[in-house]
Amino acid sequence: MQQASAERPRVSQSRQPAPLSPRASGAGLAWIGRGFLLILAAVVALILARNLLDNPRLFAQIVISGLQLGFVYALIALGYTMVYGIVRLINFAHGDVFMVGSFVSFFAVSRFSLHTWPETAFPGMSPDLSTLIGAISVILLSMVVCAILAVVIERVAYKPLRNAPRITALITAIGVSFFLEFFGALNFVFSPRFIPYQRPFDVYAYYIGGSGIGMVTPSNPAPPDSITFSSIFVIIVITSILMQALLQWLVKRTKMGKAMRASAVDKPTTRLMGVNVDRVISFTFAIGAAFAGLAGVLFAIAYPSIHTQLGILPGLKAFVAAVLGGIGSIPGALVGALIMGQAESLTAGYISTPMRDAVAFTILIVVLLVRPTGIFGEPTGEKA
Amino acid sequence: MNSRSIKVLSVLGAATLMLAACAAPRPAAQPAEAPKDQPAAPAGGEIKVAILAPLSGPVPTFGVSTRDGALLAIEEWNARGGVNGMKIVPIVEDSQCTPDPAVNAANKVIDQDGVKFIIGEVCSSASIPISEIANAKKVLQISPTSTNPGVTVGSDGAVKPYTFRACFIDPFQGQVAAKFALDTLKVRTAFIMLDQANDYVRGLAEFFEKSFTEGGGQIVGKETYTGKDTDFSAILSKVAEARPDMVYLPDYYNIVNLVTKQAKEKGLTMPFMGGDGWDSSDLDNAAADGGYFTNHYSSEDTRPEVAAFIKAYGAKYEGKVPDALAVLAYDAANILLESIKAAGTADDTDKVRAAMSAINFNGVSGNVTFDANNNPVKSAVVLQVKDGKVVYNSTVNP
């Protein structure tokens, strides 16, 4: 591992071989840290097991809300992890691009009724199909706007700093993030209000339990022994998994993916091979932002009240998820995000709701102390 | 220092920065700049009145209504020749419903503009810090809508002599809600959801719980959240588990929209009930359908004062129907100016204060007299969200 890391720059923290003595003491510390983590994990597992046996239905219900959050975080975390993988920049403006995504869909739906265009253009169309096409057009519009926004941000704010110290770009990223939040809060942009979000399609609740599966309506409430979930939960899970697969295919199987992987490893050499690295970087920003835009629409549909600081907390949590999974690793982003979603939801369910953010960021601190490379962060996997 | 520790440090540093930034709604980045009407002073003298309202921050619709209601009252007084021959000059500042910007705005109007009278703030959590400054500097404050008892009475139990309010207080709203739930809705069990960090929400929840249990009801669960939450599914799972007859959610409309929508999607059918924080044009009536809330006034009230006010408000603000915030700000401004008129001076706030304590004012939101704690004695209404509209249900007297 050490010889390899001496030759090729890596995402991992062990890019430069550390001097011998700190490394030795670091190993000792890591042992203590691992022991501590094991004990912590055992305690958490015990508490969870007890609650699971106590009331399995409530437990399942809480896990479902955690999955819903986790899959949204996964979509956002992809953007963090891809951008970090290729330019080593933690793009803090990413959470705000996510916010812009939800606002774009809000204006598309409420102001321009974009979700009804198939109905207007083809009156004979079946309502289900027209809703589907309408919703997909809204989502695509958000994704495209976010992608363009991210490319503009990259060109204006990050590209001139490509050779500056990394901390400069990081501070710029925080600046861009604040700019988007407070520019958005101006009255002629998005306004600082909490805006009730109008959904492009209706969300229904279903129950599943001993008495089968069915839709929850006022006249047909969920039986007491069943688990309820909403249609947006199913949509979020399916979309998120599809997008992960799509990205995996893009990075592993396409020419652009190959160029992205090459740029992540060594930009000057990649350039010598005739690859337009700037274009590759822009493309990476665009893809990450498109996923954030998608996540923004899904998040707003699931939690339909939007405001310009909407992106801060989900953005930070997705960032923690990316660090937890191993920043730079695509499967890591998914795994980290799912863990974050569960941690948050279980904390809210079994400790207290106000503690959930504290737990989320405690995870960040523990990961950075004990295993800064994250779960998938070993410098063997390929980075995108 | 090797690159590893630098990286870890920078990540940590950035994370702390971001955390610090999102913990408090960055007052510095958003200077409190609001439209100002400040014409040149006429020869007969002028009275400066500050209106501190949350024009940005979490509840800007409250701020806009408050400003509009107070400005309407001031305009009417000026049209009638001012107070004791003096013209009233309003100074509007954005106090953001948040302690820090509220304190900055209060200091600005008192120290820079030399204001002796403040109308505001809307939120209890902002009015309380303003009241401390106002009382230290002998500036008379009247809050139109802050319902927390701590606005007019300090934590040591002493009344703040320079702070009044135009609305009834949390104990009364919590009491009315409990009474209504037990007697009219005939519920026996309730679940309380509250934001522990919000004075207003905590106050209502506390007094609801007290009155509800004293009246023979049972609280089957109580869960807290934070004002920045968007996902309430864990709490709502517990509500589904506890199966209460009703849920008491005395928060502002932004939270109510999220909670009631997610509750409907979980298949929860019990009614939600809240306080005047629900009263907003941004309340999602479809999601909150079947819910009830206590409020200061209803536009369906038939008293002549109400009709006259609705007409004047609609004429000035392009047909808008005033909400309770606008009504209370209008009443607060009228109470203040009436007191100045009765005292015969705008320089000695002690005299104005005494006049205000003794006032018997027939306002749009009801007849107002003040008790020993500078709280008004007046009636409350219960409104219902029904078929996408908010309708009048009943009036409850103190």
Image (spheres, coloured by chain):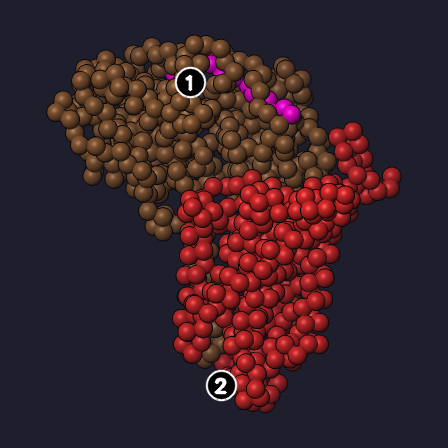
Chain colours: A red, B brown
Label 2 lies in what chain? A
Q: Which residues are magenta?
A: B376-387
The mark found on residue B311 in the picture is 1
Q: Which residue is mark 2?
A: A19
Within 10 Å of disc 2 (Cα), the crowding (few <14, some 14-19, many 20+) is few
- Which quadrant of the rendered structure holds the N terminus of chain A? bottom right
The residue under the point 47% across, 78% down is B3
The residue under the point 71% across, 39% down is B266
Q: Mark 1 or mark 2, which is nearer to you?
A: 1
Q: How many marks?
A: 2
- Answer with left or right where residue A5 lies relative to residue B333: right
Please check whether the numbered discs 1 and 2 fall on a single chain: no
The residue under the point 32% across, 43% down is B32
Quarter assignment of residue B217 = top right
- Answer with left or right where residue A182 lies relative to residue B389: left
- Looking at the picture, does residue B165 appear above or below residue A293? above
Type of secondary structure dominating the magenta stretch = strand
- Looking at the picture, does residue A153 appear above or below residue A27? above
Name the one closer to the observer, B174 or B345: B345
> For the residues marked 1 and 2, what is the alpha-carbon distance in whole angstroms?
80 Å
The residue under the point 70% across, 30% down is B269
